[in-house]
Amino acid sequence: MKKIDPTVLKETKYIALWVLIFSALMQAVFLVLRAWDYTALLGNLLGGGVAVLNFLLMGITVQNALQKEEKDAQSAAKVSQLYRNLMLLVVALIGVLLPVFNTWAVLISLFFPRIAIAMRPLFHKD
């Protein structure tokens, strides 16, 4: 296995930090609404963990694609996206179907990386 590029690790850490922050905020909202129980925590851990993993896998795909010819890189990126989307779908289904996970906690936390990416220009002007 190839070594993961430092930029991929740096960006994944950035995403993981924001997922952690958003997760804490979501848990606080569950507490305020008096809807918190262990299923909210487990759902948040499942969704947030898989969201960070998805971002890491995307970064690794981009890293590997940069070392290939354009046609091969596009093909590899499409296959990676298909498998990563399938992974997210399976996790969402698990979160919805198994009563040990709070459905909302799983589904909402899957969107945390997108929010973090959208907020990036607010904090990093470079």
Image (spheres, grey):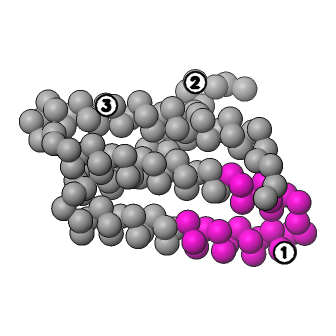
State the CA–CA distance, disc 2 to disc 1.
35 Å
Work out whether 62 lies above or below 70.
Answer: above
Which of the 4 quarters of the picture holds residue 99? Answer: bottom left
Q: Quadrant of the N terminus?
A: bottom right
Label 1: which residue? Answer: 71
The amino acid type, in three-letter code, at marker 2 is Phe
Work out whether 62 lies above or below 31.
Answer: below
Q: Is residue 67 visible?
A: yes
Mark drawn on residue 25: 3
Which of the 4 quarters of the picture holds residue 12? Answer: top right
Q: Nearer the viewer, residue 112 or 51?
A: 51
As helix, strand or loop, the secondary structure at mark 1 comes to helix
Q: Residue at x 45, y 38 (%)?
A: 19
Q: Quadrant of the C terminus?
A: top right
Label 2: which residue? Answer: 123
Point out the frontmost of discs 2 and 3: 3
State the CA–CA distance, disc 1 to disc 3.
42 Å
Q: Tag 1: Cα neighbours inside 10 Å, few (<14), some, or many (≥20)?
A: few
Is disc 2 in contact with disc 3, using a CB cutoff of under 8 Å? no
Q: Tag 3: Cα neighbours inside 10 Å, few (<14), some, or many (≥20)?
A: few
Q: Is residue 104 visible?
A: no
The range drawn in magenta is 59-84
Q: Nearer the viewer, residue 49 or 65?
A: 49
